[in-house]
Amino acid sequence: MPAEAAISVSQLNRRVKTLLEQGIPRLWVEGEISNLSRPASGHIYFSLKDDGAQVGAAWFRQRQRGPAIHFKDGDHVLAYGRVSIYEARGSYQLIVEQMEPAGEGVLKRRFDALKKKLLEEGLFDEDRKQALPTLPDRIGIITSPSGAAIRDILSVLRRRFPAVPVIIYPAAVQGDAAPAELIGALETAVRRDECDVLIIGRGGGSLEDLWAFNDEKLARAIADCPLPIVSAVGHEVDFTIADFVADVRAPTPSGAAEIVVPSQQDWQRRVATLAARMGRIGERAVEDRAQQMDWLARRLLAASPAATLRRQHDSLRENRGRLASAMRRRLLEEGNHLQIIRGDLVQLSPAILVERTIGRLAELRQRLATVARNIVSTADHRAALLGRALHSVSPLATLDRGYAIVTDARSNKVLLRARDVASGDEIRARLSKGEIIATVKEAIDSD
């Protein structure tokens, strides 16, 4: 090779550095720290190694965030950065921009990624969450039957409302098999359909201990569950994916028991108060109905044909009495007048006066008889008119004129319009004498 075609070592390393930095994007590298040094400059230098290899790493001071001083040799970490080369020595290295403990960091990123995915799908939306029953008939609990969580839940339930029965659906709450067992217990509860609210959860622990409740399949099973679910995982500061997809999140298992049932004493006081209010309302309604019935009965009695006839009969009898009294007074007056005339006649003795008086007396007698007959005739005529008027308003008189009272044969209700019956209905027609039962062939409404 010609000498002018050769490049220097520095140029070579610079080209390699360019190729590494452009060809390999920023990435996460997992490994164990060794040979860690902290010079006075504040930068941190170390090696990342695994069972088969190692690579140098540099974490410059301006990139350090968080508890960087706590890292030490032997720590298993995740380092994020770019691949470069230290040109002076020709050795490639990882320029670290961020670093965190390996175990928790991986789980945290998986948690955040799943949370973001399910959030975008709408599994956390409030409008799809179900309301809890005010007082459940039966409560289902999905958890480990031997853990502290079940004891706390049962203790609170016995204290708050011991009458509500509880069914436990056992499942592992930690380990690789836990998600499948939790899903199986949830499917069993749905299939048996014997509870109207479910509690799923466990006691506190580390992120790894609670990881079963961050399983995507379990989250989707909770979201699809037709029964309302209360998630009670860990302590108040612990959050899992199950908490976000459940209908209600309880801060602790004991808190879940507080949520799903009311206080029995409060409930009993409330029921007693409602019962007393219902009793008072019922009593007032009965009293109001009784008064209304009395009022309607009085109206019905006053408007009945019998009452009308009685009133007219009493009026006729009163008019007859008044007529007889008037006639007696008139006869008495005429008799008194006759006595006066007779006195005058006795005093006037001449025969002509007697004859004239006798003629006058005959005339007066005739007038009296005529007047008496007219009075009696007028009274009889008036009585006849009143009798006919009374007879004309009688329902029986209406029937005598050829009318009929038509009623529904089943309900006995008087029919006023043709549309109140239909073809084939049975009707009853009351005539002046007797009744006719007939079947409607056609009803023609005049409206």
Image (tube, grey):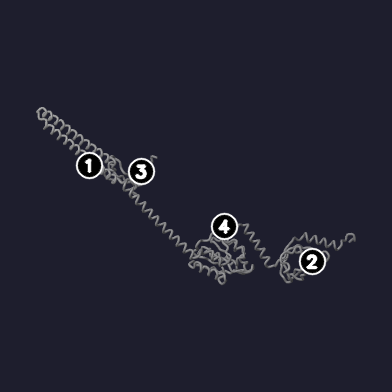
For label 3, the residue is 416
- Which residue does the numbered mark 1 point to in the structure image? 321
Residue 72 lies, in percent from the top left, at: 73, 70
Residue 416 x %, y %: 35, 43
- Circle 2 sits in a helix, a strand or a loop, which is it? loop
- First in sequence: mark 2 vs mark 3: 2
Residue identified by numbered label 4: 128
Tell me if mark 1 has few (under 14), some (14-19) or many (20+) residues whose alpha carbon lies within 10 angstroms of its own. Answer: few
Cβ atoms at labels 2 and 1 below 8 Å apart: no
Q: Nearer the viewer, residue 67 or 429?
A: 67
**Label number found at residue 41:** 2
In what element is the residue under mark 4? Answer: helix
Q: Look at label 3 and name its amino acid.
A: Leu
Q: As displayed, is residue 219 above or below residue 329?
A: below
Q: Amino acid at mark 4?
A: Arg
Q: Is mark 4 in CB contact (under 8 Å) with mark 3?
A: no
